[in-house]
Amino acid sequence: MAKNHNLIKLGDAISQLFKEEKLDEKYSIFAIRNGWEGIVGTLIAKHTTQINYASGILFVSIDSPVVRNESIYMKEEIIRKVNTFVGKRLIRELVLK
């Protein structure tokens, strides 16, 4: 039986598919939404109404002006925590609305 040198490992094929279809990005955003309270804490999570992502920017809507103002001072820390949570530098900027 001849060996086919075009074979690749299943894990490599799945990783390649995820990258080509941008599924890794979509999965990361899903994970961020589900893990938001663990990332930012109960207070911010309780007042977060929406989380969206586009081209390295995380858009977070917060329903409390006080919590939003406090979160502005924590932007860099939140970006760092989110990127650590997903295991890569996905978020470059955080926009709080």
Image (cartoon, rainbow, N blue to C red):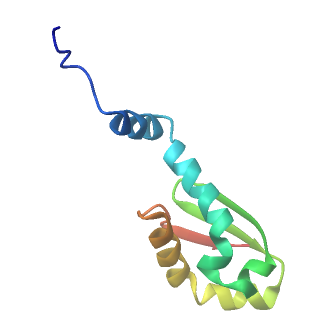
Which residue is at 43% across, 40% downward? 19
Which residue is at 81% across, 86% downward? 65
Whether residue 65 sits left or right of residue 36 in the image: it is right
Please state, as top left, top right, bottom left or bottom right, where the C terminus lies in the image: bottom right
Of residues 54 and 37, the one nearer the viewer is: 37
Whether residue 1 sits left or right of residue 49 in the image: it is left
Please state, as top left, top right, bottom left or bottom right, where the N terminus lies in the image: top left
Whether residue 70 sits left or right of residue 74 in the image: it is right
- Looking at the rendering, which quadrant does residue 35 occupy? bottom right
Whether residue 51 sits left or right of residue 86 in the image: it is right
Q: Is residue 68 above or below residue 19?
A: below
Percent x, y for residue 21?
50, 35
Which residue is at 50% across, 47% downward? 24
Percent x, y for residue 96?
68, 74
- Looking at the rendering, which quadrant does residue 3 occupy? top left
User: How many marks are shown on the rendered structure?
Assistant: 0
Percent x, y for residue 29?
60, 57
- Residue furthest to the top in view is 1
Which residue is at 68% across, 91% downward? 70
Q: Is residue 17 above or below residue 32?
A: above
